[in-house]
Amino acid sequence: MSFSLIAALALATGSSPGSDVGPLVRALWLVQRYGTSDAVNPANDQKVKGALFKALGKDGELTLSELDGLMESDTFAKLAGSDSRITPAEIDRAVENAVPESRTRLLPRLREHADALTASFDMIDETHRQAGQKLADWIAKNYRAREPLDVIVVCTGNSRRSILSSTLGNMAAAYYGMPEIRFHSGGTAPTAFNARTVNTLKEIGVEIEPTGKEAARGEPQTANPFYRVRWGAPGGSDELSLESTEFSKRYDDPANPQKGFVALLVCGEADAACPTVKGSALRVSMPYLDPKIYDGSAYETAKYAERRDDIGRLMLSVMMQARKRIASPAGAGPEKTR
């Protein structure tokens, strides 16, 4: 059974809180945090899993030679200690030490879903990997702790792909300890936050509630409610809120940032309609097939979940790569991230 199929089955069946993800996934998380830049490149994800499966052997321990270049020698030495082996207990401890405060605040079911998606980066196709690389590069270059950094995700109707992307982008930023990176959404011809989008996000634990207020209506003049979208619990007074207000709007609506943001185009129509996006510091084309084409069919729920998870794993891989570049130089030992 392939690692991708294992990950897909885990996502389909779910897992109970505190369930054991197994030694391979724990070792994968170790490498995703402390590995080399090549090791966290999603293009190499299948290779990394194969190397880890071989390296773990019967005792579940890791040696530097068995890791086959997945970790720098000085980083390995700090994790392994005097015996030059990273034991299962040391793997668990290093992984736990790498959990940022903002990840602990993610809503429980959503965090579990994010955990599962991090084990399936090999399912990201080449076109989206390349687009994600551009976004990760920009984030790493411009990120400053506790300073806002904005992304506006644009599709046509601002009802499905753009809201999936903004919500899951915010989840991914919190998961990797960078909650000041904020994703917003907009459209070129706004309609309404689609009920199917609401449902597929609720399935993985996002809390979405109408506020009782309504925004201006687009065509075809359907109701356009404001929704409170929450992906994490409140923090202390100095911590960023892990929630937002979503409604269908133009990408340049006053509710969105007006300059210095990344414009992420997630549909072909919006990509063609917006050759330039006023105020953006970077424009990235990242089109996805609209799940709308399955509306009313037997596959509707499954296809919305498929698109949600395609976008979710890409956002997580982007944030993982950005964090790797932002963090201390290669060779730094285990330490708590924000």
Image (spheres, rainbow, N blue to C red):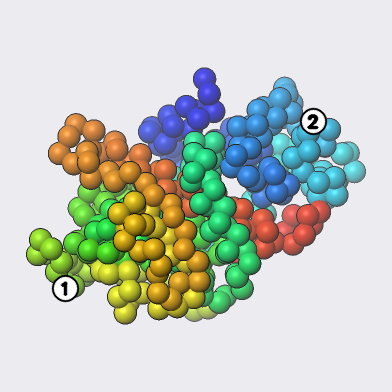
Could you say whether the residue bearing mark 2 is in a helix, strand or loop? helix
Q: Is residue 223 visible?
A: yes
Work out whether residue 90 or residue 102 is closer to the camera in this orientation and state it.
102
Q: Which residue is mark 1?
A: 216
Question: Of the numbered discs in the image, which one, if any, rests on residue 66?
Answer: 2
Residue at x 53% of width, y 78% of height: 238
Q: Is residue 106 visible?
A: no
- The percent position of residue 162, horizontal first and vertical second, equals 34, 57
Q: Residue furthest right?
A: 82
- The percent position of residue 185, horizontal first and vertical second, equals 34, 64
Q: Is residue 98 above or below residue 88?
A: below
Task: Say whether disc 2 or disc 1 marks the residue closer to the N-terminus.
Answer: 2
- The part of the image, by quadrant, that contains residue 70 is top right
- The part of the image, by quadrant, that contains residue 66 is top right
Residue at x 25% of width, y 39% of height: 301
Viewer-nearest of labels 2 and 1?
Answer: 1
Q: Amino acid at mark 1?
A: Ala
CA–CA distance between discs 2 and 1?
Answer: 59 Å
- The percent position of residue 39, horizontal first and vertical second, equals 68, 42
